[in-house]
Image (cartoon, rainbow, N blue to C red):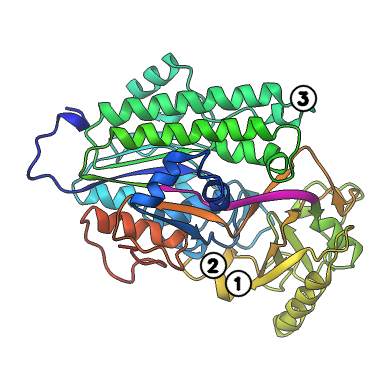
């Protein structure tokens, strides 16, 4: 029995969540004539800019959005995290998320969830009725549960992700075509399982929006060569959101949200090279390749995006900073970061966040000591080549932002004032009448 075959009258309320990775609220709200379906969502429900998390990195954002908890509780801080007590690093996957996802809580309540293309969910869980893992999956063969899902997705040429290498080409035509094809099959799959599954929570993410923003966002903001192609792609996103909304029965509330904002990129900032030049970081080898190559006298090192670790004695294997000097050293590093200017004379850093402010929980032992939120135009990198320039440019012309995250709730009683990513999970549970302990989340329900 599918969603639309249900008998009415005694059913509990349901939610459909559609993620639009990296879509800034300003893009949609300032172009309502181009995006009428988002405009209708705002007019008939509620919509606003919300805050992302620290750091605004998709690998950390989606675990926080889907659990309502900060990285100190999810255990995921970014695309790369470090092992406790070593310099070894790993790429966090779905099994590394150490907090219950919203669909886990829905399933525990005896309800059914269909989850599709959410980043950091590989390998797919077996405790939901249907899951297709998203970003970081090794391939479709192992990303879909149960097996009949994979068979269907293969039949429509479903892609887990766009081919980002195409975005590195000067001519973006092939990249744009690939982005459209990826978006088309994602919508086709969402539409199919909207109708096929008897779900209480549908949770699906369009991630191609993030990919398009990385390579075309400056074209949009600064009237570049591919501005019309960028807007054409987003008109299709708007149309697909509108079609999905039209399919939903009255007892389903639609939520559409991004995980962070976006802005134009002018300079990549290679912070480990900056740390090396400023005397904070040194290496044991002439050609360092990884974190383990740092030398004993190192005082600080960096991970993307803008995460800084003090090389603390007793915590790091070759820690050089005594615990008694930790606060002074961290304050000195913070001051140096805040003073940094780019080649254009603009300050690189908007603000520096201390770990105690952003992270709390059982997994804050791997938290960065400082996190830099950059000013618009600067993308914070790391790397251990030690031969790169501090400021550089690459094929990408768009970057994540902490501000300008989008949230739309198709419910007239929702109040999005001063909201952030942590509020989304408790909001979904409230809308579904799923009981939860107040104070269990870092956010609160918006209804």
Q: Nearer the viewer, residue 385 or 370?
A: 370
Depth order, front residue of 435/414: 414
Report the residue that reaches farthest toward the bottom.
324
What residue is rendered at 34% in x and 52% in y?
Answer: 45
Residue 184: in magenta span: no
Name the residue tied to disc 3.
171
SS majority, magenta: strand
Q: Residue furthest top?
A: 155
* Label 2 Cα crowd, 10 Å radius (few <14 / some 14-19 / many 20+): many
Where does label 1 land, which residue?
355
Q: Are marks 1 and 2 in contact (CB under 8 Å)?
A: yes
Give the CA distance from mark 1 to mark 2.
Answer: 8 Å
Q: Residues within 10 Å of mark 1 (few under 14, many from 20)?
A: some
The label on residue 154 is: none
Q: Earlier in the sequence, mark 3 or mark 2?
A: 3
Mark 3 / mark 1, whichever is N-terminal:
3
> Which residue occupies 42% across, 14% down?
155
- Would you place residue 317 above or below residue 214 in this image? below
Image quadrant in which the C terminus is located: bottom left
The x and y percentages for residue 34 are 53, 38
Given residues 144 and 290, the one toward you in this image is 144
**Residue lying furthest front in this view?**
33
* Quarter containing the N terminus: top left
Residue behind mark 2 = 364
Which SS class for mark 3? loop
Q: Which of disc 2 and disc 1 is earlier in sequence? A: 1
Task: Please identify the quarter of the rendering in which residue 436 is found.
Answer: bottom left
For marks 3 and 2, give the one nearer the viewer.
Answer: 3
Q: Residue at x 67, y 51 (%)?
A: 263
Look at the numbered discs 3 and 1 and tell me whether their residues touch, using CB distance below 8 Å.
no
Q: What residue range appears in magenta?
A: 256-267
Helix, strand or loop at label 1? It is helix
């Amino acid at each position: 029995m599918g969603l639309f075959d249900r008998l009415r009258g005694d059913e509990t309320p349901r939610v459909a969540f559609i993620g639009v990775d990296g879509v800034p609220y300003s893009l949609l709200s300032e172009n309502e004539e181009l995006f009428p379906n988002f405009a209708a969502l705002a007019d008939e429900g509620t919509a606003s800019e919300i805050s992302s998390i620290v750091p605004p990195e998709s690998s950390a954002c989606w675990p926080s959005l889907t659990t309502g908890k900060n990285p100190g509780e999810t255990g995921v801080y970014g695309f790369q995290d470090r092992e406790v007590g070593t310099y070894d690093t790993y790429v966090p996957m779905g099994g590394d998320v150490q907090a219950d996802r919203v669909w886990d809580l829905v399933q525990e309540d005896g309800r059914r969830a269909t989850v599709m293309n959410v980043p950091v969910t590989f390998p797919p869980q077996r405790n939901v009725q249907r899951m297709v893992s998203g970003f970081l999956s090794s391939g479709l063969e192992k990303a879909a549960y149960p097996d009949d899902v994979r068979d269907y997705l293969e039949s429509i040429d479903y892609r887990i992700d766009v081919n980002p290498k195409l975005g590195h080409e000067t001519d973006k035509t092939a990249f744009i075509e690939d982005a459209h094809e990826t978006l088309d099959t994602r919508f086709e799959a969402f539409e199919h399982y909207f109708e096929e599954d008897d779900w209480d929570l549908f949770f699906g993410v369009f991630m191609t929006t993030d990919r398009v923003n990385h390579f075309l966002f400056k074209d949009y903001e600064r009237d570049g060569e591919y501005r019309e192609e960028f807007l054409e792609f987003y008109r299709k996103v708007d149309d697909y959101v509108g079609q999905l909304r039209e399919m939903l029965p009255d007892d389903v509330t639609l939520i559409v949200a991004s995980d962070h904002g976006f802005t134009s990129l002018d300079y990549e900032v290679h912070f480990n090279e900056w740390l090396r030049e400023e005397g904070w970081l040194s290496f044991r080898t002439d050609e360092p390749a990884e974190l383990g190559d740092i030398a004993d006298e190192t005082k600080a090192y960096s991970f993307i995006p803008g995460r800084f670790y003090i090389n603390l004695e007793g915590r790091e294997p070759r820690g050089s900073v005594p615990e008694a000097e930790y606060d002074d050293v961290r304050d000195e590093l913070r001051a140096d970061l805040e003073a940094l200017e780019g080649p254009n004379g603009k300050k690189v850093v908007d603000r520096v966040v201390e770990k105690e402010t952003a992270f709390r929980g059982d997994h804050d032992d791997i938290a960065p000591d400082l996190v830099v939120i950059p000013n618009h135009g600067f993308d914070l990198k790391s790397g251990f080549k030690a031969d790169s320039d501090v400021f550089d440019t690459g094929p990408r012309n768009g970057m994540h932002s902490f501000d300008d995250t989008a949230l739309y709730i198709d419910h007239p009683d929702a109040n999005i004032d001063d909201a952030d990513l942590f509020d989304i999970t408790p909001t979904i549970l409230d809308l579904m009448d799923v009981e939860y302990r107040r104070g269990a989340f870092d956010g609160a329900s918006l209804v």
